[in-house]
Image: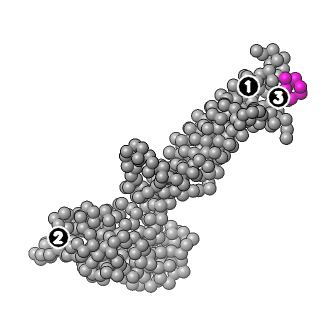
Amino acid sequence: MPWYLYHALKQLFPSGRFFSFFSLVSIMGVMLGVCVLIIVQSVMNGFGEGIRKRLVETEGDIRIRSSEVIYDWEKYYDLLEAQDEVVTVSTFAEGVIMLQHQNRPQFPAIRGIDPLEEEQVVPLEKFITMGDIEAFDDGGVFLGEGLAHTLRAGPGSIVEVFTPLMLERLKEDEVLLPREFKVVGLFRTGSPAVDGNTMISTMRVMQELYGLDDGVHGILLRLRPGVDAFQYARQLESDLLRPGLEAVSWLESNRDFLFVVEQEKRIISFILIFIILVASFSIAIALMMAVIRKTREIGLLVAMGARPRQVAYSFCFQGFVIGSIGTLCGILMALVCLHYRRPILTAYSKLTQSEVNFLGVYDVYEIPVHYLASDFITVTCFAIGISTLAGLLPAFRAARLKPADALRSE
């Protein structure tokens, strides 16, 4: 080992002590900065990954839709089902209704599906929390848990449905009575926006409520793993679909929302980077104090033949070691905190006597975590690089000391 590296390690780990006080403070600064940065990035990744997964599960990979009712859907249904990239196909119809239970009105979205087809594209049975998919028929509906809570309805309740078709018939002096349906179950997708504002009926019921005859509003596609939904949607529009039909991937339909989530992660990470920058100042100050305290020792080293650049290497290496140890400890601390995040939040709630509730934020019911190797690599390189650079100023000062002046220093 070169002598200047050995000298740097002796400065950091003096005989009889595990760490010098200044080194310990500097390492803790880097550790806390890295820990917070990794936690924030991993949690934000979890939010984004959970949202993307939920969007695909509830919307499918690609939606084929039109500004008008699609009556020739059977032709495209067969063509799409024959494509190698497509796993399954299903049709849907959707709209807005007025739903009433015990004089409590709500205006949710209604989605008409074919249960046998839909299960292959959107796993409805996976989301059902009460009730049974076997009981789903033209006389029954499923309600989102949030919507059911607002209406104070549950399995077995009778709800009344009013549709825009009633207003159209009134213009023709024809009165349509509201339709009554039995709630056969509740579902929870994990998205409060969906669970609090959605009712599901059979396709036949939806076609009757909206006067669609045998038409639909769109076709859902589930693609094989590895197929790019955006590129395949463009290919469908150019090669297969007639004018008037639009293929929209889940990424396109939610682009603005996903962009906001990604930007939030970047902005928060940018703000937290300053924690590491503050830690770098503590490293610079600690090393500068070491130069001042060790002035005569540095002069003696130079007088014995040490070159200025070797003295500079010694202090830069100290910054590198501090950054490396602080980064490693910070990553380990972040992994432990994220692994035990539920007990930590529970203890925090009891300590502050307040409930930590993330329901409704980012459409999640709990704090998710998703690790990306790129985040760990970026944070590690940044933290170690800043820590090493923090040793440059003390290193330059030490390298410029003249032996005679250093030995005369008090």
Query: Which residue range is magenta in the image?
Result: 300-307
Q: Residue at x 69, y 38 (%)?
A: 322
**For the residues marked 2 and 3, what is the alpha-carbon distance in whole angstroms?**
89 Å
Q: Look at mark 3 in the image and give the residue it sits on.
A: 308
**Residue 19 located left or right of residue 87:** right
The residue under the point 44% across, 75% down is: 121
Q: Which mark is residue 291?
A: 1
**Residue 143 place in picture, x, y as percent:** 30, 69
212 to the left or right of 290: left
Q: Position of residue 318 (x, y in %)?
A: 73, 36
Element assignment for label 3: helix
Q: Quadrant of residue 109?
A: bottom left
Q: Is residue 31 visible?
A: yes
The first of marks 2 and 3 along the sequence is: 2
Q: Is residue 211 above or below residue 268?
A: below
Tell me if 56 is positioned left or right of 12 in this view.
left
* Label number found at residue 212: none
Q: Crowdedness of circle 3 by 10 Å Cα count: few (<14), some, many (20+)?
A: some
Which residue is depicted at the point 15% across and 76% down?
Answer: 176
Q: What residue do we see at 42% from left, 55% from top?
A: 362
Farthest front residue? 16
Q: CA distance from mark 3 to mark 1?
A: 13 Å
Task: Please say whether residue 151 is one of the residues in the magenta stretch.
Answer: no
Q: Nearer the viewer, residue 235 or 302?
A: 302
Give the residue at mark 2.
167
User: Could you tell which of marks 3 and 1 lies nearer the N-terminus?
Assistant: 1
Residue farthest toward the right in the current orientation of the protein: 305
296 over 50 or under it: above or below: above
Residue type at mark 1 is: Val
Residue 375: x %, y % from top left = 60, 52
Q: Say which label, 2 or 1, has the lower sequence index.
A: 2
